[in-house]
């Protein structure tokens, strides 16, 4: 696909590894382009995506060398914003494995994931104002949703970087796993998701992503479709028949 993004088929999921370790996986235009190409594929294939970084770093931000050259028209294009929005809107879950630095645009890519796993070396935050810009690829609204207004405002207005323990306490990651075991943990989560009904998983994600004004109608509409699905019938019948068979065995004892 590209030298800066390794994409591997891992059965239950697709693993995408940001692979510019010599630049701490800084997100440049090339990476944005290949992430868009990956999204185009996953919008059709509908697979769980695991995003990780190579070399003990998730991503140290957007590429500052490129950012320095960008002007107002580039800002208005939302180069990283559109890419991370597309990742966020992928039909199946996105899991981010956050090892080491997840800064600036790297943190915003992580905020776009549905599930975030940290490692003890995690350092996450948004130092953009120190570079004379704002965190414009999702942090100002998404971080608030994840950790609440108080901590999000403090992080964005002071550029303070959180370590693993604080990120866990704030709910910015759902768990901390040793670096060597983090990918395996993500694979376990993806395997678990693969046992569930993909249509129900995708409907749940759509409801989770919907704005407050869309509730509860969106849940009801999604449920109406699922209530008619043969897969719901099959799964519920299987459950009830299993219980029935167990009861019959118990009663015959
Ligand atoms: N954009 C472009 N290049 C970056 C980068 C970024 N966001 N982050 C790191 N790099 C490059 C460095 O310029 C350096 O390149 P060089 O070897 O050609 O000089 C290389 O990656 C290694 O970086 P270095 O700073 O030497 O690594 P480190 O391990 O000492 O420090 C960081 C790691 C992440 C603390 C440090 O690189 C850093 O502060 N990066 C910028 C973080 C940031 O402000 N991100 C927000 C951007 S919106």
Image (cartoon, grey):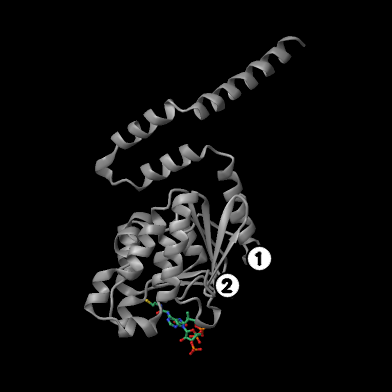
Residue occupying the point 57% across, 44% down: 194
Give the residue at mark 1. Answer: 180
Give the residue at mark 2. Answer: 54
Residue occupying the point 39% across, 71% down: 105
Instruction: State whether residue 51 is above or below residue 229.
Output: below
Residue 198 vs residue 41, the one in the foreground: 41
Q: Secondary structure at mark 2?
A: loop
Q: Position of residue 104 (x, y in %)?
A: 39, 72
Residue 217 vs residue 123, the one in the foreground: 217
In three-dimensional space, the C-alpha distance between marks 1 and 2, rounded to whole angstroms, equals: 12 Å
Q: Which circle's residue, 1 or 2, is located before the other in the chain?
A: 2
Q: Please identify the residue farthest to the right as the structure is shown.
A: 253
Q: Please identify the residue farthest to the left as the structure is shown.
A: 72
Classify residue 132 by image quadrant. Answer: bottom left
Residue occupying the point 42% across, 41% down: 204
Instruction: State whether residue 65 is above or below residue 101.
Output: below
Residue 172 vs residue 92, the one in the foreground: 92
Residue 2 relative to residue 105: left or right:
right
Count of numbered badges drawn on the protein: 2
Q: Position of residue 43 (x, y in %)?
A: 44, 52
Q: Secondary structure at mark 1?
A: helix
Q: Residues within 10 Å of mark 2 (few under 14, many from 20)?
A: many
Residue occupying the point 34% across, 31% down: 220
Asked if ligand 1 lies within 8 A of label 1, the reply is no
- Report whether residue 185 is seen: yes
Looking at the rendered image, the quarter that the C terminus falls into is top right
Q: Position of residue 44 (x, y in %)?
A: 46, 50
């Amino acid at each position: 696909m590209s030298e800066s993004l390794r994409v591997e088929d891992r059965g239950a999921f697709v693993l995408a590894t940001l692979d510019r370790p010599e630049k701490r996986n800084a997100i440049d235009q090339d990476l944005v382009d290949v992430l868009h190409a990956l999204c185009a594929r996953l919008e059709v294939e509908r697979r769980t995506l695991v995003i990780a970084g190579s070399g003990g770093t998730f991503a140290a931000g957007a590429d500052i060398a490129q950012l320095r050259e960008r002007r107002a028209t580039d800002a208005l294009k939302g180069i990283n914003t559109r890419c991370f929005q597309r990742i966020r809107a992928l039909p199946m879950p996105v899991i981010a494995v956050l090892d080491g630095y997840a800064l600036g645009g790297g943190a915003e890519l992580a905020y776009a994931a549905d599930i975030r796993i940290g490692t003890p070396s995690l350092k996450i935050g948004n130092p953009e104002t120190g570079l004379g810009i704002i965190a414009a690829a999702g942090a100002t609204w998404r971080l608030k949703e994840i950790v609440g207004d108080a901590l999000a405002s403090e992080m964005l207005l002071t550029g303070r970087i959180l370590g693993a323990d604080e990120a866990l306490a704030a709910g910015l990651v759902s768990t901390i796993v040793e670096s060597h075991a983090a990918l395996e943990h993500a694979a376990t989560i993806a395997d678990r998701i693969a046992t569930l009904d993909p249509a129900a998983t995708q409907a749940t994600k759509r409801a989770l992503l919907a704005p407050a004004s869309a509730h509860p109608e969106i849940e009801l509409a999604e449920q109406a479709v699922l209530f008619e699905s043969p897969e719901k019938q099959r799964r519920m019948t299987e459950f009830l028949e299993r219980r029935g068979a167990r009861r019959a065995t118990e009663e015959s004892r």
